[in-house]
Image (spheres, helix red, strand yellow):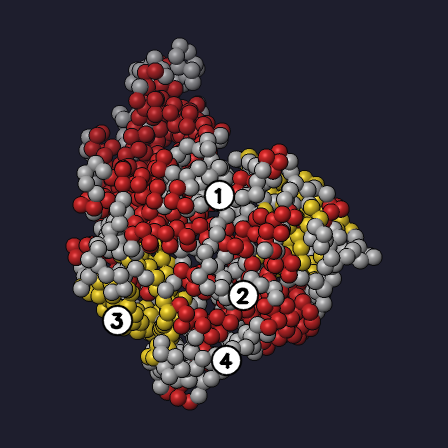
Amino acid sequence: MSDFETVAATEDQSARRGVSGEPGTPAATQRPRSLAGDAWRDLRRKPVFWISLVLVVLVAAMAAVPSLFTANDPRDCLLSRQHAGPSGGAIFGYDFQGCDTYARAVYGARASLLVGAFSALLTGVIALVVGMVAGFFGGWVDAVLSRVIDIVLGIPLLLAAIVLLKRVSTASDNVRLLAVIFVLAVLGWTTAARVVRSSVITAKEQDYVAAARMLGAGNGRIMWRHILPNALAPAIVVLTIALGSFIAAEATLSFLGIGLKAPTISWGIEIDAGRVHMRESATPLVVPSVFLALTVLAFIMLGDAIRDAFDPKLR
Amino acid sequence: MTHAAVRPTPASPTPPGGHLLEVRDLHIEFRTGEGVAKVINGVSYHLDAGETLAVLGESGSGKSVTAQAIMGILDTPPAVIRSGEIRYQGRDLLTLPEEQRRQVRGKEIAIIFQDALSALNPTFPVGWQIGETLRQREGMSRADARARVVELMDLVRIPGAAGRLGDYPHQFSGGMRQRVMIAMALAMNPKVLIADEPTTALDVTVQAQIMDLLADLRRDLDMAMILITHDLGVVAGVADRIAVMYAGRIVEHADVRSLYRAPAHPYTKGLLESIPRLDVRGQALSTIRGLPPNLMRIPSGCPFHPRCPYAQQVCVDVVPHDLVLDDGRTSACHFAQEVRDDSAR
Amino acid sequence: MTAPANPAKVRGETILAVDNVVKHFPITRGVLLQRQVGAVKAVDGVSFELRRGETLGIVGESGCGKSTLARLLMRLETPTAGRAVLEGRDLFAAKGGELRRLRRNMQMVMQDPYTSLNPRMTVGDIIGEPFEIHPDAAPKGSKQKRVRELLDVVGLNPEHINRYPHQFSGGQRQRIGIARALALRPEIIVCDEPVSALDVSIQAQVINLLEQLQDEFGLSYIFIAHDLSVVRHISDRVAVMYLGRIVEIGTENEIYERATHPYTQALLSAVPVPDPDARENRNMIRLTGDVPSPADPPSGCHFRTRCWKAQEICATQDPATVPRAADPHPSACHFAELRPVA
């Protein structure tokens, strides 16, 4: 209903030039409000946004400074404490190796978040470039790039990851971390690229792009000033959600033994280890699983909340 | 706002059985995250059998919302009907149970919209869509419904009707789609037809055809029509009476001829003076200064006072009642007589 | 801001000459290997001249090609054929720097004030963008000052330079669009339905503003609209388009009082007049049928399928838009005649 969304009339204050005009003030109290500003005002009122944000901040803090959350060393393992109950700082007890279950889950956040964040970042770069080029130039460029997207989309993630990561199975921890990030990004950019492409196509058809062109603006300026800002918001939403699923994918790969490997600590490795001895004690399986699930959920909820806030249909 | 002052107009004195359709002191709000917008603020009007009432207003005036309230198709929430009555043949539609309300909708009162393309389902043939109500609500057989659909399409002058039953909406031009909409509205022989900006999306030659058609149908089928529009030219062509809306109120109500000859509300006067005319050369366009009000912050007193050249202190302080002029028209202006005399000059 | 009009430039001289411009949009089949199966003849040989300081109105119904014509003139579409001479150069052949320079002289005000302004840019950025693209148009450091002047010129409060488009009403947004078009001090402004998206009471404000700016800056307008009353009000000369062609062109008086083309006559007679007393004695020409598809226009005269005067010659011979015996202004009808006064 735009029927009542009229703007406030205030006294005609600048009837200079005899343009017995509409007054310049939409509303006396109004200040400049950008779309992002409006989205923020909208987000502020949403509990889902705050809950997911708190979770994300917690996990990020855990990844950055794990010692804030536990005093115990996750690598301080004594077989004599195998599957021992909670004691000291080990609030969830000990695992098969006699390591502090909670401490290992806390320290696992770093690898998971690193993989998630950098995969999402790399994905974003690929998606923005491919989506922008395909959407903006159209024609055969678009046809070729769209087919490439289709092909990559058709590759089963796990199968391709197994094949690709086999080659680095003996490499150092850091190389393997990079390899996982790379593989996830290379296989996972397609959805985001499609979103970028379609928002670029929508933005390209807008009158304000035509207006810029009529002023003599070149392709670079039009892409940078007029199209990118309008394609960015949906891309960020998709990437936030993708970040969550990349963390889950890392865990899956590590769980299968083809991602990260001990002595690196990650949720996937912990879940795998916990699974083997599930019968004896379920906590070493449950704790990293809950950490993983909450983190993935937090990112997906955050992405959803931002999407709603930016949705022009609700404005 | 008193209804007593609105009801008697010379064009149609209250018939013994009451009016066919009557809106009384309707108040509607829209409650949104931003605040409460007072969209309809005491609207009263009536419609008698066989006449055409034009409701004229700009966007945000509430002209369409009133029609949606009559049809019972307002989205609630965000809309809230605060008070008022909508009487059809004496029954208050607002208090009617939904089941009976549905009987009125389409069968007694039907509506056509501006945007025929989005009002039609793109995935079904038009013949099927026109016939849907006949099969569902009248329980007609397929063959009977089909025959009636062809009859309806002939009625709205769609050429080669029988051959076009299977065509889809996108195969029709804008004008033809509007005819399909009219055929759908007429399917159940309504007594009242509400036409909400029926020709706004159409070209001028097609607009003329559709307005002709509506006028002919209204006469031939003995319907009453409410024509909702912003176009003063369209109103002049077909309406008997006219109600001018501003900020959710009816500011002037008169028979068409006297209103065009000498508007008695400054808003109507301003509108008439601000439109360029095909038949008048070299006129200077006067303008109404300012903007329509924000319905969340309607100005005190007369809502038009910030834009009104006649405004005095009384307009800021006192909400004007409908003033009945000597010729029976009403105007919600403290200076109605003066405005009319100025206009007549 | 001072008027850009050079005193040496003579009012009334030809400033833009459009010669036989054609735009056919190919209709293609297939996704990767596209082959052309036909063409939508959106603009099919249009010629006219725009004179300095005048307003040329272009009227026609939807699909007649008037908006495509505007996009062609603004080089948003590439014409299939034709020339448009601006400042002695062919606008349609210009490229790169030359095109950028020519663009400074010709700007457009668009129809929809809601989509023509980038929602993520402030008003200052929107009106300032022309100066960023053409840094020589405003001396260094004076951009902000120029933007404020422009806001003032179009009747908006210069203090609102930091606001975003959605904080303005439709009419105010249209003023922002006009300010942007004025920024480079063009001599020609193409107005594509500039008031049709606005409320009645706001339309007059914008029309008056356009007229005032024309007087002040010596602008020439190409004013495209479907509303014949608005066009009559603002135009000095008027061209009537039907199915991609100009069927009649002349002074405002010639078109509105002495039209000789049956389509113009029908169009004029269909305009609703805000006068209830005119209801009965109006003599309306009722056209039947719809506008044919521009992908498959009728042979000969495009209007003949809806014309009550059509004869055999109309199907075989394309009437040229030339002066006719009935009245000396160009009209594309074999049977051009004045309409008897009702």
Q: Which kind of residue does numbered mark 3 sit on?
A: Asp
Residue shown at the point (24%, 54%) measured from the top left: C5
Real-space Cα separation, disc 2 to disc 3, in angstroms: 34 Å
The label nearer to you, 3 versus 4, is: 4
Query: Which sits earlier in the primary sequence, circle 2 or circle 3?
Result: 3
Measuring from the top left, give residue B223's x and y in whole percent. Answer: 70, 65
Residue beneath disc 3: C19
**Circle nearer the N terminus (4, 2):** 2
Image depth: mark 1 or mark 3 in front? 1
Q: Residue at (43%, 82%) from the top-left corner?
A: C337
- Locate residue A282: give its quadrant: top left
Q: Secondary structure at mark 1?
A: loop
Instruction: Tell me if C207 is positioned left or right of C127 in this view.
Output: right
Q: Quadrant of the C terminus of chain B?
A: bottom right
Identify the amino acid type marked 1.
Gly
The residue indicated by pointer 1 is: B290
| Crowd rating for badge 4 (residues with CA inside 10 Å; few <14, some 14–19, many 20+) | few
Q: Which mark is residue C47?
A: none
Q: Find the distance from the CA under tag 4 to the CA under tag 2.
A: 20 Å
Instruction: Tell me which corner region of the image, top left, top right, bottom left or bottom right, holds residue A301.
Output: top left
- Vertical position of residue B243 compared to residue C123: above or below: below
**Quadrant in the rendering for residue A297:** top left
Chain that bears disc 2: C
Viewed as shown, does residue C226 lie left or right of B38? left
Does residue A258 appear in the picture of this structure?
A: no
